[in-house]
Amino acid sequence: MSHHVAMSPTEQLLRDAGLRVTRPRLAVMEALVAHPHSGADTVLGVVRRDHGGVSTQAVYDVLNVLAERGIARRIQPAGSVARYELRSGDNHHHVVCRDCGTVDDVDCATGEAPCLDASPGHGFVIDEAEVTYWGICPQCQKTPVPEDTSARHTSAR
């Protein structure tokens, strides 16, 4: 009699990518579900808070292998640390708040890669365009602007 235990979608995702299901991998993926667009330090803090002692190197290694295998997507808006999200493989972009650095997803307006047409003559076959929109998030729009912030909207440029 076989006792087949059904795998969670997260476990299946790891197996489909040819990866072993390990506690650190599951913990990192759980952290990214709860906190998309997080940097490695944030992921590390969440993993340690929720799962106890996991080494810094283990979290960095997991983030790197998830990005290499296409499970996670690594983005790095100008002036920001690398951030990770589990939404990968689709054609979406990001909007970044100039004040607080919040990142959110923006679906592609055209629906298919590369979204933009590059000027001809460069010799490349373009298959992807990365678009980052910049602005002020709803929360920061509600925050009063202090008197001495003439550079408020230019700090992240």
Image (cartoon, rainbow, N blue to C red):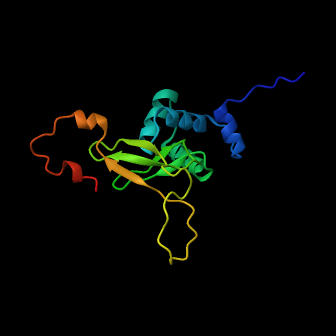
From this viewpoint, which residue is outermost toward the left?
147
Q: Is residue 38 visible?
A: no
Give the x, y percent position of residue 118: 48, 68
Among the 4 quarters of the image, the one containing residue 104: top left
From this viewpoint, which residue is outermost toward the right?
1
Among the 4 quarters of the image, the one containing residue 101: top left
Q: Is residue 49 visible?
A: yes
Give the x, y percent position of residue 75: 46, 51
Name the residue rendered at 55%, 66% in the picture.
126
Name the residue rendered at 59%, 47% in the picture.
66
Name the residue rendered at 36%, 56% in the picture.
78
Name the residue nearer the viewer: 146 or 132: 132
Name the residue nearer the viewer: 104 or 120: 120
Q: Is residue 125 above or below residue 2?
A: below
Report whether 143 appears left or right of 6: left
Name the residue nearer the viewer: 131 or 24: 131
Q: Is residue 64 above or below residue 8?
A: below
Q: Quadrant of the N terminus?
A: top right
From this viewpoint, which residue is outermost toward the front?
110
So how many labels did they put on this image?
0
Give the x, y percent position of residue 28: 54, 37
Report whether 61 appears left or right of 42: right
Give the x, y percent position of residue 44: 46, 39
Q: Quadrant of the C terminus?
A: bottom left
Report whether 137 appears left or right of 112: left
Name the residue nearer the viewer: 12 or 96: 96
